Every structure is written in C-alpha cells, then in structure tokens.
Amino acid sequence: MNKLIYIALASVLTAMAVPASAQFAKAEDAIKYRQSALFVMGQHFGRLAAMAQGKIPHDPKAAADSAAVVENMSRLPWAAFGEGTDQGGNTKAKPEVWSDNAKFKDAAEKMMAEVAKLNTAAKTGKLDDLKVAVGATGGTCKNCHDNFRNK
C-alpha cells in the first residue's frame, strides 16, 4: 500500500511541476517562491513544535489550523527547484539538490508523508499525538536541511 501511495504522490508532483515551472519568468522568481512557501510552512510548524515542547500552551484548534497550513504549503516549493534555479537570487540550496535529484525528491516525499500524518495527529486534539508527529516531521525537515541546504 505504501508503494502505491508513493507512486501516486510522485505522479501528482510531476503533474504539478510542469505547469508551475512555466509560471516563473526568472530563476529569481522561482527562488523567492520556494523560499516563501518554505518560510510560511516553517512558521506554522514552529507553532506546532512550540506546543509539543511545552513552550506555549497546547491549543487544539490552533494546532489543527497550523497543521493544515503546513500540509498545504508542503506541496508548493518543489516545482520551484527547476533548471537554472541553482544560481542567482539568495538561494541556500546545495548543488546536491540537482546533482542528486532523486535523493532530494525522495526526501521531499518523505517530508510530505510525515506532514500528512502531522495534520491527522493535530486533528485528534491530543497533545501526545501531536508530540509524536512533530518529532517525526521535524526529523524529515532536519534530514533535508542537513543534506540539501547551506547554513
């Protein structure tokens, strides 16, 4: 079943990538787009992490709302890693995004799968469920940052 999910996800990503890559007139536009999507996703994930770590009170409605934003935003940045977006702008993307693109896409797919679980966990309203999902999702974010993002 997991293999079928990954195949479907890859098909959706591929279908989204073609029209999205055509929307960027300049490489700098694509870089800004992906950075903006990742920034918004990070802000909402940060709220969830703060709840999971007890830094702010757990608010089930706010958690569910933020998790929904994270899941929606998690689908956006990948189309903006097209050809020619490895230079210009203020990109922090490592060359490995393009030289080891299969590994990069795999990391993106794993993150999106964990984000979907995060959204489901947040909807339960249970802090313990949120904690587990935040940890797993954060691990996929860290993996991608470690391998594909310059500090």
Image (cartoon, rainbow, N blue to C red):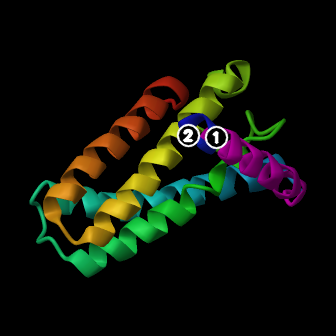
Q: Is residue 96 left or right of residue 2?
A: right
Q: To which residue does mark 2 refer? A: 1
Q: Secondary structure at mark 1?
A: helix
Q: Quadrant of the N terminus?
A: top right
The magenta-colored residue range is: 6-24
Q: Quadrant of the C terminus?
A: top left
Q: Give yes or no for residue 11 being in the magenta stretch.
A: yes
Residue at 32 percent of width and 71 percent of height: 123
18 shown above or below 71: above
Amino acid type at mark 2: Met
Q: Is residue 28 left or right of residue 118?
A: right
Residue closest to the eye, 46 or 17? 17
Asked where in the image residue 102 lies, by quadrant, the reply is top right
- Of all residues, the one furthest to the bottom in this rendering is 61
Residue 22 percent across, percent down from the top left: 90, 55
Residue at 11 percent of width and 61 percent of height: 55
Q: Give yes or no for residue 83 being in the magenta stretch.
A: no
- Of all residues, the one furthest to the front in this rendering is 1
Say whether marks 2 and 1 touch (CB < 8 Å).
yes
Residue closest to the eye, 120 or 148? 120
Residue 72 percent across, percent down from the top left: 55, 65
Give the Cα distance between marks 2 and 1.
5 Å
Residue closest to the eye, 18 or 30? 18
Mark 2 crowdedness (10 Å alpha carbons): few <14, some 14-19, many ≥20? few
Mark number for residue 52?
none
Q: Residue 151: in sight, yes or no?
A: no
Q: To which residue does mark 1 refer? A: 4
25 shown above or below 137: below
